[in-house]
Amino acid sequence: AIGRPILGSPASVNGFDRDAVAGYLGRAYAAPRIVVAASGAVEPDALFEEASRRFGGFGAGAPGAEEPAARYVGGEKRVKRRTEQSQIVIGFPGRGAREDGNYAAHAFATAAGGGMSSRLFQEVREKRGLAYSVQAFHWTFADAGLFGFSAGAAPGDVAELARAALDTLAETARGLDEAELSRAKAQMKVALLAATESSPARADLASRQLLVHGRAIPPAEVAARIDALGVEDVRAVGAGMLSGPPSVALVGPKGDWLDAAAVAARLAGGVS
């Protein structure tokens, strides 16, 4: 599940036995859950025949408990270490792949902190010199999303950096303009083209879209959805994400001021 270590915990790993593994295989590796995707010089009929031969014997799978929906709750975690810089990540609930506003969330993250021309980079690094690297992100999963920013700063600058970044995000939600959105759209479409540049990448993209949406979405359709985004739509989604409960993570020597309550208070009333 999202937020849990991929390798599991010592207790869960030590609890594995043959029956547990076989039971999982029976539930998860079943015909209705298999996607076969290919791209390039492929003969469709031959591929279908080979897939049928290889996977036709897979059963429908044993019924299992329905996976619970993702639930974002926020929180904070500090790890004190004697490092030259403190690394921080502040996150908020984003938009899932099936949710309205997913493309707008990506556009907001790109405009706010997706490159050297973004507001975060210009304000936090170029103008104030508080970080060598600072960037915003929006991670999309099937039924959940996570928006936020990450940065590294000298321990004494963490509080000022966090406040400056949060203020910049709030200002973006209030004042994003057409020129900024146009740059963000162009960046998103370039990333889309890069993601479909090679045959392996196209097959990977198609397989993920089939699993999440039930169909492969043509790049032209994705580009049209990006082009259709308006400034007010993106501002509204950005403000909605920033109004959610924060997640705060810090690794480094100190983290004065930086906690979830302080982040929420900084944004309260300033993102509408």
Image: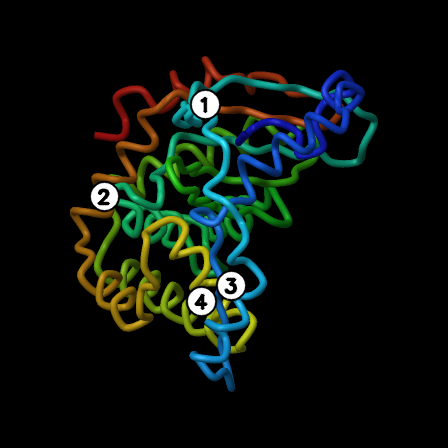
Q: Which residue is mark 4?
A: 191
Which circle's residue, 4 or 1, is located before the other in the chain?
1
CA distance separating discs 3 and 2 = 23 Å
CA distance separating discs 3 and 4 = 15 Å
Report the amino acid beneath label 2: Asp
Q: Which residue is mark 2?
A: 100
Which circle's residue, 1 or 3, is located before the other in the chain?
1
Report the amino acid beneath label 3: Asp
Q: Quadrant of the N terminus?
A: top right
Residue, far bottom? 41
CA distance separating discs 1 and 3 = 28 Å
Which label sits in the foreground, 3 or 4? 3
Instruction: Say whether residue 94 is left or right of residue 50.
Output: left
Q: Residue at x 41, y 68 (%)?
A: 192
In this rendering, the answer to whether 240 lies above or below 114 is above
Q: Which residue is mark 1?
A: 65
Q: Residue at x 80, y 25 (%)?
A: 81
The percent coordinates of residue 150 (x first, y second) are: 56, 40
Category of crowding for the residue at label 2, using alpha-carbon neighbours closer than 10 angstroms: few (below 14), some (14–19), many (at least 20): few
Q: Which residue is mark 3?
A: 204
Q: Residue at x 59, y 46 (%)?
A: 129
Name which quarter of the figure residue 95 lies in: top left
Category of crowding for the residue at label 1, using alpha-carbon neighbours closer than 10 angstroms: few (below 14), some (14–19), many (at least 20): few
Instruction: Say whether residue 68 is left or right of residue 131.
Output: left
Which label sits in the foreground, 1 or 3? 1
Instruction: Say whether residue 150 is left or right of residue 254.
Output: left
Residue, far top? 261
Residues 95 and 35: in front is 35
Residues 172 and 194: in front is 194
Which circle's residue, 2 or 4, is located before the other in the chain?
2
